[in-house]
Structure formats: C-alpha cells, structure tokens
Amino acid sequence: MPRDNSREHRLLILAGLASVFTALILIAAKTIAWLMTGSVSLLASLVDSVMDSLASLINFFAIRYSLVPADEEHRFGHGKAEALAGLGQAIFIAASSVFLIYQSILKLMEPKPIEENAVGVAVMVFSIAMTFGLLLIQKYVVRQTGSTAIEADSLHYLSDLAVNVGIILVLVVSQFGYLWLDGVVGLVIAVFILFSAWHIASESVQLLLDREIPGDVREVISAIVADHPQALGFHDLRTRQSGRTQFIQLHVDMDQNLTLLHSHDLATRIETRIQDAFPMADVIIHQDPVAVGPKVTLDDRPPG
C-alpha cells in the first residue's frame, strides 16, 4: 500500500506546533508560580520547560527541513536532520541539568521556606494536564510516522510528568518543615534530566552513524526470500534509517540461466513483499547470477 506522505507531513507539523505552544504556555505559568513560591523545584521545572521550548523549536524546523524531497545534492533525502535535532536537544537538556544541579546545591546549603504553596500545586496540576494532552498527540504521530525527532521530544515530556508529580509532593510536604526536600528533589530532577540527555544523544548519534535497523529484519527477509523457490538465497544485507525512511539493500542469488525479464520479475516480487513488511522502507535488490548445474542427459555424460 503506498504511503500517504501528505498526511504524514501534516501530522509531523501538527506535533511540532503542539510541542512549541505547550512549552510556551507552561513557561508563562511556571514563571508566575516560581516568582510567588521561590521553590528551587519549581525553578527546575521552569528551566526544563525553557529547554523544552528551545528543543521543540529546533525540532519543528528540523522536521520541516527533513520533509523536503530528495534533490540533486541529497539523493537520499534530508531525513537525518531529525537525528541532528535530537543531538541539539540533548545539548540543551544537558546544559539545563548542570544549571539545576548548581541551584539545588545552593538550596541545600541555605534552605528557605516555600511561599504560596497552593499556587505552585495548581500550576503543577495544570502542567500535568497540558503535558498529558501533548503526549497523546505525540504518541499517535510517532505510531503513524515513526519520527525520531518527535519520539525524542515525547520521551522528554514523559519524564516531565514524573517531575511534576515530585514537585507537587515537595510543595505539600514543605509545609510541615521539611525545607531540605526542595533542594533534594531539585537535584534528583537535574540528574534525571541529564540521564535523558544522554539517552537522546546516544540514539541520535547511532542514527547518524547508520546503525542497523533494530529488530528481526534479517529473519523476516529470510522468510520472504525462502517463499520464492527461484531465489537461491541472499547475502550482504545492509540496513539503516534516515528520519522516517528505512533503507534496505541486499543481494539475491538467482539461477544464471534465468532471462533478464524473469530475474527482474522475481526481484520485483521480493521487493514488494519486503515493502509490505516494512512500509517505511526503500528497498534495493541486486541480482547475483549463480551457476546451477544443468540436468545431465545420457549424451552429455563425460566419456568413461
């Protein structure tokens, strides 16, 4: 079944815009809450949202660029822009975590009471609702398009849910005199953000280095080739992913006595089956002629 690229493009743009607008709304709400409460945990969440907005903007423009069709200078398209966006996200997220570690240590050294706890709790509940709605959109888009950049963005917003719940806990418990808890939770959030940055950077680098597509690709292709008796085997299977497009290349062994028309038809049938199994794939099959011993008649037997 042919891919509806225009629909995929619309979904990717929708997810990118939703991420940017959500981050901007949360920045405004958390800024007000932080100024009223003075909580370092809320500051951590605010800085996280600022990093989210910057990362989402990078994502948005990277996605738009990755959707540009292949041209004479980029024959394989512009899909790797998404992996570059993921790498940019990781840098921003790591920088924010270092700042939060510093602020949390200061808070632990000089703990101060948190004011206007109710305002902080209300903002965090609002943040959870906004983030959850965005995640629903992102998860749907990732299922439909397989976008690496949207998946990286979604991973970070998923961690924000846990962060916001932890901040609500801090705001409530601090009323009972546990002032040190604000600095501790801020430090935990910072380390968690740093770990997320490492994960995103690692995945992005692997995509840029053309890592093999994970999963049972080889087993599936082996079964497809085996379903075609005229295909004598395959070798030199290579796979990689660029943005949403998977590239699969392999050599299929065929009887050298097959006509060009028959060998091309066989390769086309195998290619179609592979594309059915991997709808996001661009498949290239090289046909290798293999000598198959002809049937020996009585007259063809060597003397003796």
Image: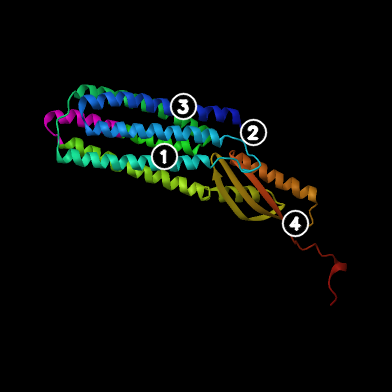
Check disc 1 and give the amino acid type. Gln
Check disc 3 and give the amino acid type. Leu
Residue linked to disc 1: 89
State the SS at label 4: strand
Marks 1, 2: nearer the viewer: 1
State the SS at label 1: helix
> How far apart are the two marked residues, 4 and 1, measured between alpha carbons?
51 Å
Whether the magenta-drawn stretch holds residue 173 is answered as yes
Marks 3, 2: nearer the viewer: 3
Prevailing SS of the magenta stretch: helix
Which numbered disc, 4 or 3, marks the residue that appears first in the sequence? 3
Which numbered disc, 3 or 1, marks the residue that appears first in the sequence? 3
Which numbered disc, 3 or 2, marks the residue that appears first in the sequence? 2
Count of numbered circles in the view: 4
For residue 202, above or below residue 304: above
- In contact (CB < 8 Å): disc 4 and disc 2: no
Q: Which class describes the residues within 10 Å of circle 4: few (<14), some (14-19), or many (20+)?
A: some
Where, by quadrant of the figure, is residue 164 drawn?
Answer: top left
Identity of the residue drawn at 50% across and 39% down: 82
Residue linked to disc 3: 17
> How far apart are the two marked residues, 3 and 1, measured between alpha carbons?
16 Å
